């Protein structure tokens, strides 16, 4: 890969790729090949980050426990035991090739704090510039979702996507125990076709029946969520088989070569039947016996207009504590770079304080969840979450000043911390409703949908 641009590659390994599901012994053959692949990429001038699960699995082996327990403190204790040995294993393998590594442990709470997020981002940048391979894992000993009111990452799939966005990676490889995504379960359907390229995840129709291993918490569905996150940040995301990590090099070479030659990778398109219309323009199939291509994999194409830096953090680094319902006029104004004023707020839901994150949902004025008479799922146009925001007022304060002019804030509250419910720099919109990485689509009017495509 000489004479090619320098790339940043994030490689995510699940628990099933690191330890044997039954014996809990480390899969040294796979780990050794991953190390060789990472070192080769570094020697070729690229930057590599590894997101590694497996701490609980390694802890089970060390403590001679047969099954993953269900008691949370016991799981966290095993993660603490296993993380030491897991990092020691990685360090030992990389040391054979004289490659320095670093350990980075993160929780959702770290990502949610803007200062800590930036500190982590700066640490990643410095390590990569030093030629070090950071090895990232969720800090399971501290990550208690019930205490933090924040979701866990999900067997590191989501963590790997956020990490890829944080380091502005070119590629995210989600290594798993299958070659790629299929339109059907290949174990039960001999005619299953491999999905090679996904242009729009919103139109993806793939088999996601595979759950994670008994040691992990992920599965194919969490990998698709991770792909949504990463591609929205401009990261090419690849699902590939972990037992053949050397394919990472071949896939990168193939993609880079085809993009340089043609601008886009060649596609082998299968004409869909009438029952497969949802796949028509979004997915290209790879014949299973076609040996003239790159190794079998699924590649999710990045968004040509990615969401990065602060706007990505607002959307995916924070957990929303409530919902602010706004009308279409307010949405158009904010999409046109204005702040969110009280007059455009229809209603508020949840319990949140100042400077906490909320969902922004567009509704037709007159609809209100507080009225208890309107089912949002059935109204036309249906309400839709369009983005996230950090608010200047609490839920109770917004409930009192919603629909009012800014000049009336002081009269109602007795003070006016800001004329805006949320400043424009604290609001971020999803680029495309149908492909956005979080809340499932609830539908949206054509006017608003076109606005999402251009709002940032």
Image (cartoon, rainbow, N blue to C red):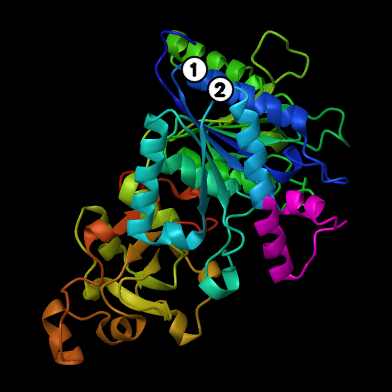
The residue tagged 1 is 43
Q: Please provide percent x and percent y for residue 130.
A: 39, 30
Kindly identify the residue that appears in the image at 41 percent across and 43 percent down: 166
Q: In the picture provided, is 139 more to the left or to the right than 162? A: right
Where residue 43 sits: x, y (%)? Answer: 49, 17
Classify residue 425 by image quadrant: bottom left
Classify residue 379 as left or right of residue 346.
right
Q: Nearer the viewer, residue 378 or 13?
A: 13
Task: Name the spot of residue 387 as percent of width and height, x first.
Answer: 39, 58
**Residue bounds of the magenta highlight:** 56-82
When the figure is inspected, residue 261 is found, relative to residue 375, above or below; the finding is above
For residue 385, say whether it is visible: no
Q: 55 or 262, which lies in front? A: 55
Few, some or many residues within 10 Å of mark 2 (<14, 14–19, 20+): many
Farthest residue to the left: give it. 407
Q: Which residue is mark 2?
A: 39
């Amino acid at each position: 890969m000489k004479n090619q641009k320098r790339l940043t590659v994030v490689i995510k390994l699940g628990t099933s790729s690191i330890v044997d599901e039954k014996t809990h012994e480390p899969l040294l053959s796979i780990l050794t090949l991953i190390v060789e692949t990472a070192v080769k990429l570094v020697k070729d001038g690229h930057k590599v980050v590894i997101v590694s699960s497996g701490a609980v699995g390694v802890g089970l082996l060390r403590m001679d426990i047969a099954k993953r327990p269900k008691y949370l403190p016991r799981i966290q204790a095993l993660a603490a035991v296993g993380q030491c040995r897991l990092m020691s294993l990685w360090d030992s393998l990389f040391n054979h090739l004289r490659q320095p590594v670093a350990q980075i442990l993160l929780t959702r709470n770290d990502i949610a704090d803007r200062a800590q997020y930036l500190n982590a981002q700066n640490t990643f940048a410095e390590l990569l510039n030093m030629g070090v391979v950071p090895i990232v894992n969720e800090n399971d000993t501290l990550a208690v979702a019930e205490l933090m009111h924040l979701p866990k990452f999900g067997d590191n799939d989501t963590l790997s996507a956020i990490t890829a966005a944080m380091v502005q990676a070119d590629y995210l490889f989600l290594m798993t125990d299958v070659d790629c995504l299929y339109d059907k379960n290949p174990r039960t359907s001999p005619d299953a076709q491999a999905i090679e390229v996904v242009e729009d995840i919103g139109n993806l129709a793939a088999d996601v029946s595979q759950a994670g291993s008994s040691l992990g918490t992920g599965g194919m569905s969490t990998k698709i969520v991770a792909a949504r996150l990463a591609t929205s940040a401009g990261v090419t995301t690849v699902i590939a088989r972990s037992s053949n990590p050397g394919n990472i090099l071949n896939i990168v070479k193939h993609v880079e070569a085809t993009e340089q030659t043609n601008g886009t990778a060649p596609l082998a398109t299968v004409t869909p039947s009438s029952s497969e219309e949802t796949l028509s323009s979004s997915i290209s199939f790879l014949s299973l016996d076609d040996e003239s291509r790159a190794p079998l994999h699924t590649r999710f194409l990045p968004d040509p207009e990615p969401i990065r830096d602060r706007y990505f953090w607002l959307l995916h680094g924070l957990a929303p504590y409530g919902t602010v319902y706004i009308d279409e006029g307010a949405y158009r104004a904010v999409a046109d770079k204005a702040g969110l004023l009280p007059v455009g707020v229809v209603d508020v839901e949840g319990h949140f304080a100042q400077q906490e994150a909320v969902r922004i949902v567009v509704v037709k004025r007159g609809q209100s969840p507080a009225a208890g008479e309107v089912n949002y799922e059935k109204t036309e146009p249906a309400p839709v979450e369009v983005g996230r925001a950090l608010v200047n007022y609490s839920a109770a304060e917004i409930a009192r000043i919603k629909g009012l002019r800014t000049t009336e804030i002081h009269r109602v509250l007795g003070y006016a911390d800001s004329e805006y419910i949320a400043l424009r720099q604290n609001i971020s919109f999803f680029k495309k409703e149908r492909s956005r990485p979080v809340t499932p689509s609830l539908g949206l009017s054509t006017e608003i949908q076109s606005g999402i495509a251009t709002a940032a």
